[in-house]
Image (cartoon, rainbow, N blue to C red):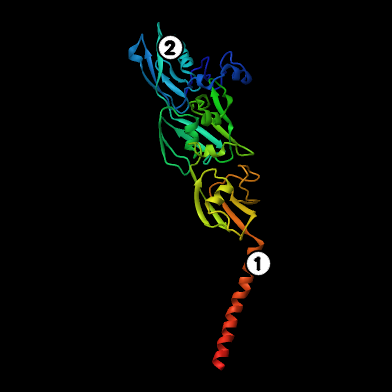
Amino acid sequence: MLLVSGPFGLAASGQEVVLPNVPPERELQAQYPSLQDDVYIIGPGDLLELKLFGAPDLSGTLEVLNDGSVSLPLVGSVRLSGLTIQQASLWAQQLLGDQLLRPELQLLIVKPRPIRVTVVGAVERPGLYSLTTRETTQTEGAPALSMSGLPTVVDAIQKAGGISQQANLRVVQLQRRLPGTPFRYKRTHLNLLDLVLKGDQQQNPFLFDGDMIRLDRAEEPPSEAIELAAANLSPKMIEVNLIGEVNSPGRLELMANTPLVQAILAAGGLKDWRANGGNVELVRINRNGTATLKRFRFDMSQGVSNASNPPLRQGDTVRVGRSLMAKGSDAIGAVSQPLTGLVTIWTLLDLVNR
């Protein structure tokens, strides 16, 4: 298939042609300072409408094919992928100028393609997601939410199951393609904590096809971890196992980001004399199948921190160890129980003999 050459797209040989007067990538950051000001970029799957005012019989719809091309009347196959509507209109007008005396036209998007974005990093289900204007999203352990309208960063994170408990919401990276060829990208950082805690909608921009959202891991959970557990970015509920010397051992359903100390209290607290508050073990199964074991001290004065009172994750197991007195009592019981039975047998024999 022959692709018509032009100032914005591919040459006939298929070679990439850079947009004229396009500055280098470091200058593009300053040229496009606001995500809300970004323009739509045509891509495969878009349905366009061409209106030729001087030749209405040539007007009609144009479907952008997988290779990014459309069939332009009187011209043939023309690649529009990677261009803005304004750039595509100027190029189509230039090409049709060789065929028509008055190539006045209007190019519109009548049906945009689905938005496919990549969500990676500290989310529950990282991967590639397709978003439309009507979606049902669900964070882990929370009811399904219906959304309508253009998808945003929060919508994509919710569709990926919500944030993990190590997510650094203060620095969320958003990568977006810029118009033209070859591919150029700009990157910016969002502060989703300002969105959740202050309501700053500028931190939740609309998404474009091809966007990439990256959430890095934080070394320490934020001081607002408990407040974040109630936000719709986070999984709502988790299930953990409490075993050992607690008053109500077993499997518990807790709010996401519940810290270790609060989980032990939810299990009835420590047994009075049997529990060793200085030997609390946390067993965690990682995504790669490995397990980690960490020991902590039960201290109700500690705030949330990975070092002394970590927030729990789905599937964690917490074991409270026995005190020395409990170990001694259990040892005596283990020895005395069979002796008691033996003594009882000798007593019965003695009575029979008598």
Residue underneath mark 2: 96
Q: Earlier in the sequence, mark 2 or mark 1?
A: 2
Residue neighbourhood size for the residue with mark 2, other residues' Cα within 10 Å, grouped as few (<14), some (14–19), many (≥20): many
Residue underneath mark 1: 328
As drawn, the residue found furthest toward the left would be: 57
Instruction: Residue type at mark 1: give it.
Output: Gly
Residue sitting at x 48%, y 29%: 152
Task: Give the x, y percent position of residue 266.
Answer: 52, 50
On screen, residue 70 versus residue 212, left or right, reads left
Task: Give the x, y percent position of residue 35.
Answer: 53, 22
Task: Give the x, y percent position of residue 312.
Answer: 57, 46
Q: Mark 2 or mark 1: which is in front? A: 1
Viewer-proximal residue, 262 or 101? Answer: 262
Residue neighbourhood size for the residue with mark 1, other residues' Cα within 10 Å, grouped as few (<14), some (14–19), many (≥20): few
Disc 2 to disc 1, C-alpha distance: 94 Å
Task: Give the x, y percent position of residue 54.
Answer: 36, 8
Instruction: Residue type at mark 2: give it.
Output: Leu
Q: How many marks?
A: 2
